[in-house]
Amino acid sequence: MTGDDEGGDGVPTRRERTLRVIKGAKAGTPGRPVRRRIVTRPAPAPGGGIEEVLERLDREPVEDPLEAGDLTVAGDPAEVEDLPGPDAADDADGPASTGGAAAAGRSPADDNQPADDTGQPADDPGDAGPGRRRALAGLLVVLLAAALAGAGVYGHRWYVARITEQARQGALAAARQASVNFVSVSAASVDRDLQRITAGATGEFRDEFSRGQAQVRTAVVENKVDSKGTVLRAGLVSGDRRRAVALVAVDATVKNVKAPQGRPSHYRIQLDLVRDRDSGDWLVAKLQFVG
């Protein structure tokens, strides 16, 4: 054997001085080369003997390359030079990685984006996709339709309530005036007074008053009647846009041949009113004294 194969006087040969650790690797980032580092153990001093070295190594714990996370290689400088170092790994991330990203349709700036659990870049929350925009537009349309429907319902109710209240107020005003007209008759203006009562009547009340109008005129003229009335109180029993029932309290001062100075009279009158479809005026359909 030559001097390279064995040493003399117990001196280990070059191969015996080289300590090797089994190569291993762990899963890293896909697409990036695994970095390797070199770990060497100092060779024993000459004269120790191979048996002593092996015995000492057996007593020392050896780190598992898979748990250490890096591939550990020990060897001579010639073998180490063939392994890519950190600079080579950085070079591999350069043009080649850029080209790979470009080939995949991604720019290097995409690598700076946050990644989700699958390792893919997370979508920018400010960049809404077509589906999200359509959903947002649909929601706005629904909200707008609901607002318009609510406004329409509210507006209709407000309009109905408003015109109903106006109609009730009109019926009450007509009842007050009809009551005053009915008790305010004078021999000096009998025809005009009776015509005013007839103009504000309809239905049953108009028919009855028309049939007895001649007799009323005769009695007013012969007795020289002069009656004037004023409304004390008035209110609606019921009412809507077409029909109403009102109660009116009236005081009147009546003069005639038997009471030339006049005497007070008090009346409580119930009037049933209906609204004329053509003119919109409230007319008395029925009149009666109550209480």
Image (cartoon, helix red, strand yellow):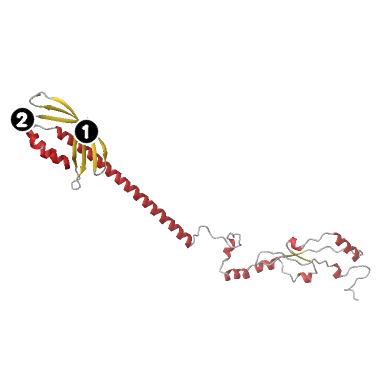
Examine the image and state in which quarter residue 275 appears. Answer: top left
SS for callout 1: strand
Q: Quadrant of the C terminus?
A: top left
Whether residue 154 is visible: yes
Q: Which disc number belongs to residue 202? A: none
Q: Quadrant of the N terminus?
A: bottom right
Measured as percent of width and height from the top left, residue 279 is found at 18, 46
Residue under circle 1? 248
Q: Which disc number belongs to residue 222? A: 2
Note whether 242 is above or below 22 in the view shown.
above
Residue toward you, 28 or 101 = 28
Residue most extreme to the bottom: 1
Count of marks overlaid on the render = 2
Residue sitting at x 86%, y 69%: 16
Residue toward you, 291 or 153 = 291
Q: Is residue 243 left or right of residue 58?
A: left
Query: Label 2 near label 1: C-beta < 8 Å?
Result: no
Measured as percent of width and height from the top left, residue 49 is found at 91, 65
Examine the image and state in which quarter residue 270 appears. Answer: top left
